[in-house]
Image (cartoon, helix red, strand yellow):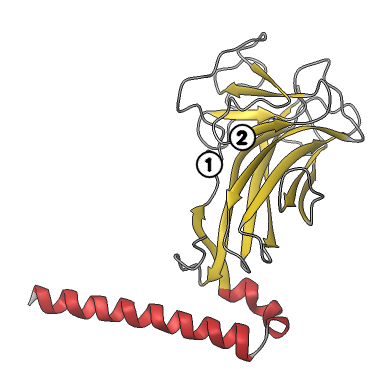
């Protein structure tokens, strides 16, 4: 009896998957992409599987070593100390990396234990309106759409807003971004740690790898732009997995 039920269950799941493939073909090919753009938010969701390495800036290999006061680690441009990420910027720019146990912004992480401050450690300054940031290159499937999401944070009233950041999408490091996901301005009034989650989609076109860069945007007297919980997920029909293998 149980064998029969298991077989029927497998047939049911297989039928659903085949139906999804057929439906996607119908929507994308027969109707044409331009006619279903308005329906993508309804039928196409992020599949729940981030393609990034260490999107929450954790320390799985135990390399975190505070090198400034407050239990914070200053990471200069070019640093690859954080697993999966490279610090980017200009000149003496840097980012600050810390755990929840730090003293300037305790319990600042929105996912896991660690998080970043894109404004860095003084005398770090903005250049052309931007602070430093972090960058990661990851494999993608060509001709697909992906969804980027990330959190930015303030710490009221000590390190308030307004703050802003932007996710830049490139086909390779050093190239000009062809898509952007802006975040902010964020200026909450509540006390303590406050976060804003920003989300945006981008196409891969023919690219089989994408470079993501997230940088802080300078404002008036901006002293802290927290960053955490970065995710890039494939957008697929009904959020089904396995449709975006590189």
Q: Badges 1 and 2: C-beta atoms under 8 Å apart?
A: yes
Secondary element type, mark 1: loop
Q: Quadrant of residue 82?
A: top right
Secondary element type, mark 2: loop
Q: Quadrant of residue 208?
A: bottom right
Q: Position of residue 220 (x, y in %)?
A: 91, 31
Q: Position of residue 105 (x, y in %)?
A: 65, 22
- Crowd class of label 1 (few under 14; some 14 to 19; many from 20; radius 10 Å): some
Q: How many marks?
A: 2
- Residue labelled with disc 2: 85
Residue at the bottom extreme?
A: 30
- Quadrant of the drawing holding the N terminus: bottom left
- Residue labelled with disc 1: 53
Is 53 above or below relative to 49?
above
Q: Position of residue 58 (x, y in %)?
A: 52, 30
Is 17 above or below relative to 112?
below
Q: Position of residue 121 (x, y in %)?
A: 75, 18
């Amino acid at each position: 009896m149980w064998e029969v039920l298991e077989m029927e269950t497998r047939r049911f799941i297989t039928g659903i998957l085949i139906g999804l493939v057929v439906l996607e073909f119908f929507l994308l090919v027969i109707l044409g992409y331009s006619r279903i753009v308005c329906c993508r938010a309804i039928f196409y969701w992020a599949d729940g599987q981030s393609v990034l390495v260490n999107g929450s800036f954790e320390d799985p290999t135990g390399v975190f070593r505070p090198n400034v006061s407050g239990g914070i680690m200053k990471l200069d441009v070019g640093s690859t100390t954080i697993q999966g990420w490279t610090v980017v910027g200009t000149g003496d720019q840097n980012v600050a990396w810390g755990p929840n146990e730090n003293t300037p912004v305790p319990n600042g992480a929105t996912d896991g234990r660690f998080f970043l401050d894109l404004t860095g450690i003084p005398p770090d300054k903005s250049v052309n309106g931007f602070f430093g940031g972090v960058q990661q290159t990851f494999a993608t499937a060509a001709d697909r759409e992906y969804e980027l999401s990330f959190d930015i944070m303030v710490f009221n009233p000590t390190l308030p807003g307004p703050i802003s950041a932007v996710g830049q999408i490139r086909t390779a490091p050093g190239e000009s971004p062809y898509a952007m996901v802006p975040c902010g301005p964020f200026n909450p009034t509540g006390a303590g740690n406050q976060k804003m989650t920003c989300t945006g989609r981008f196409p891969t076109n023919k690219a089989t790898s994408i470079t993501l860069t997230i940088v802080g945007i300078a404002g008036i007297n901006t002293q802290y732009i927290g960053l955490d919980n970065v995710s890039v997920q494939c957008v697929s029909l009904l959020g089904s997995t396995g449709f975006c293998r590189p």
